[in-house]
Image (spheres, rainbow, N blue to C red):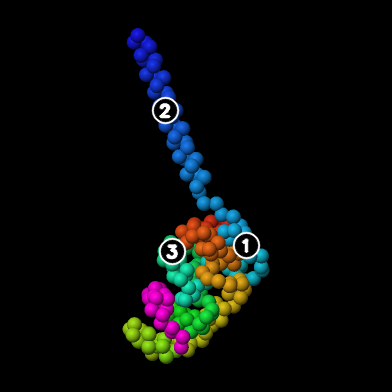
Amino acid sequence: MQFRKTTFHTYLSKIVIIFFTACFGFVSTSGWTTTPRFDEGIDYKRLNKNHRYKKTKKIEVVEFFGLFCPHCRKFNPAITDWSKKAPENVVFMKLHVPFRELAHQRLYFTLKKMNLADKYINLLFREIQDNRLPLKNYLSIITWAEDNNINTNDFEENWNSDAVKSSMKEATLLMKTFEIRGVPQIIVDGEFLTSPAMAGSNKRLITLLDYLISLRTR
């Protein structure tokens, strides 16, 4: 009887081990199958154009956006966090498109030249989208700058600077080069175009950016 009891317990222990091994194997396999899969032509498209932006030493990630765009506003926290953790061989640029209001583009690049763009971008999203503050001409913009404790002399100097005008021209040229027709859209190293709409969500797009960068480093 003792022999039979021991044999039964041994047999039962083996069944338990096999059961848990199968369960953990299922979880592992299940986790593997949920790894994001990205498809060219759906999540992103390859740009088959030859241009100088493909030949830079570092990998350039360019976001085209607009202060008027609610989707850009929602995406901004995710792309900002990602850019702070990007590898050293990656350069991130945020370029305002000339859609709707050229004044918005000029305002953004003026603040960028003053190293104030990151500080005021969320406020500008709120002012333009929630408070319906037009900021369509210099008078309304300089008044806004003064109300927000920005040195108006420095602001005016940068507003009229060649550097700001050059940044506007460069952004507009890149937009035309990559045929940007909506925002937000992202170009990865002059090779790939994608957007939150293509990827399906802001979170998925962030993962996609890492994937596309890995393609450029292979």
Res 123 visible: yes
- Mark 3 vs mark 2: which is more N-terminal? 2
Residue 95 screen position, x and y as percent: 51, 74
- What amino acid is at disc 3? Ala
Mark 2: amino acid:
Ile
Q: Residues within 10 Å of mark 1 (few under 14, many from 20)?
A: some
Residue 134 placed where, x, y %?
43, 83
Which dot marks residue 78? 3
Q: Amino acid at mark 1?
A: Arg
Name the spot of residue 20 as percent of width and height, x first.
42, 31
Cα–Cα gap, marks 1 and 3: 23 Å
Q: The magenta stretch spans which residues?
A: 118-137
The residue wearing badge 1 is 46
Give me the C-alpha separation between circle 3 and circle 2.
43 Å
Q: Is residue 11 above or below residue 114?
A: above
**What residue is drawn where x is 52% and y is 45%?**
33
Residue topped by disc 2: 17
* Residue ID at (37%, 10%): 3
